[in-house]
């Protein structure tokens, strides 16, 4: 993340275990933060949760994947993974934009984002 001293109103946090909006970035603001994702599959199968951008004129473009985790489970073993990355998102002056979490098809998955707007 960028160094700085944001006010309390500029700090954003979101966490989900189901598909939906993680955070809403206000119009005309940049968001920088840390994204952490987890996924596990207890049987044969796979899970690929994602975090994407959504909104008109968002940068990176709407639908861009800013986080993805691919996990495969085996018959007798649990498959699990965790990933962490920094994200930088721009909301245009004319509208708010969002970060959207899509849960993996099998097993359990989650995403948490913490950061601030400037």
Image: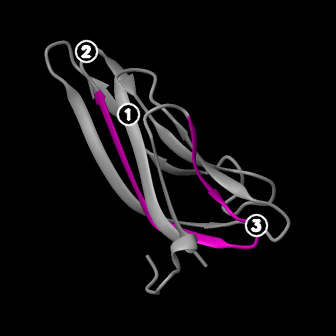
Please tell me which residue is depicted at 67% across the width and 46% down the height of the picture.
Answer: 63
Q: Is residue 77 left or right of residue 118?
A: left
> Which of the two discs, 2 and 1, labels the residue nearer the N terminus?
2
Q: Which residue is mark 1?
A: 109
Badge number at residue 43: 2
- In the image, residue 99 above or below residue 29: above
Say if residue 17 shows up in the picture: yes
Residue at the image point whose x is 51% and y is 81% from the top: 6
Report the mark closest to the observer, 2 or 3.
Answer: 3
Question: Residue 62 at what x, y percent from top left?
Answer: 71, 51
Q: Which residues are magenta?
A: 20-40
Of labels 2 and 3, earlier in sequence is: 3
Coordinates of residue 32 in the picture (x, y in percent): 52, 70
Q: Where is the C terminus found, in terms of image quarters?
A: bottom right
Q: Nearer the viewer, residue 89 or 12?
A: 12
Residue under label 3, please give it: 27
Give the SS element for disc 3. Answer: loop
């Amino acid at each position: 993340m960028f160094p700085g001293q944001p006010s309390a109103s500029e700090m954003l946090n979101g966490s989900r275990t189901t598909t939906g909006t993680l955070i809403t970035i206000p119009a005309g603001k940049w968001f920088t933060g840390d994204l952490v994702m987890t996924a596990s599959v207890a049987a044969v199968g796979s899970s690929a949760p994602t975090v994407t951008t959504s909104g008109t004129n968002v940068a990176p473009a709407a639908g861009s994947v800013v986080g993805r985790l691919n996990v495969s489970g085996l018959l007798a073993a649990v498959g699990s993974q965790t990933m962490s990355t920094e994200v930088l998102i721009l909301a245009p002056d004319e509208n708010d934009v969002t970060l959207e979490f899509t849960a993996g098809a099998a097993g359990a998955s989650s995403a948490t984002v913490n950061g601030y707007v400037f």
